[in-house]
Amino acid sequence: MKKLTFGNWKGLVAASLCCVGLFVGGCGYQMDGFSSASSRAHSVLGSGNSTIKFDKVEQITLFPWVQYYTRGVVRDEVNLRRLARWVDDGNADYLLTVNMTGFKVRSSISNRVDNTLLSTTTVALEMIVRSGKTGAVVWKSGPVTYNDKFEVVDEDSAVREGIKEVVRRTLDLMQQEF
């Protein structure tokens, strides 16, 4: 019987990983990062090679920072998902409009004994994608609403969390193919 050495051990691990890769690949799964095509998400914007820029971002809150924060969250999430490449000026394949259609934040203390600040946040928004060449509407999310209770130090943190989640959910709709 042959003794298991480090060299044999590496070969056994490599063979096992190949077998697992073949099995998982046969089920339709792909490992991200092995090709540029597999690492891009498909959406109404295509395979991620198109360019996009903001047309406008409208918000209805009394917080002046919400418009800039929403822009940053949308931009970060589109980059994270590799849906498109952002351009700031010049022509783009797509123009994105973000309309905040509803907003409410309420804060309260949990009870007389426990002074925990609870904030209930409701954020509704709609995204509209237009062709950069013709201006025609390519995709419209319709109103997407998210509300939740947050146990946070201040109201602004609850608003930020609500905006992040409603943006994620809206971009999820952009990636659905049915």
Image (cartoon, helix red, strand yellow):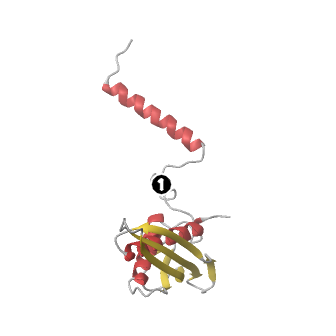
At 37% across and 15% down in the image, what residue appears?
A: 2
* Residue that sits furthest to the left in the current view: 6
Question: On the image, which quarter does residue 73 sit in?
Answer: bottom left
Q: Position of residue 132 (x, y in %)?
A: 55, 83
In-front residue for pair 100/10: 100
Secondary structure at badge 1 equals loop
Asked whether, in this view, residue 1 is left or right of residue 142, the answer is left
Q: Residue at x 59, y 68 (%)?
A: 173
The residue that disc 1 covers is: 35
- Residue 153: x and y in percent read 34, 70
Outermost residue to the right: 178
Is 169 rendered above or below residue 57?
above
* Vertical placement of residue 102 versus 23, above or below: below
- Asked whether residue 96 appears in the rendered view, the answer is no
Density class for disc 1 (Cα within 10 Å; few <14, some 14-19, many ≥20) is: few
Residue at 50% across / 72% down in the picture?
167
Q: Quadrant of residue 10?
A: top left
The quadrant the N terminus occupies is top left
- Residue 39, position as x, y percentages in the image: 48, 58
Compared with 128, 41 (above or below) is above
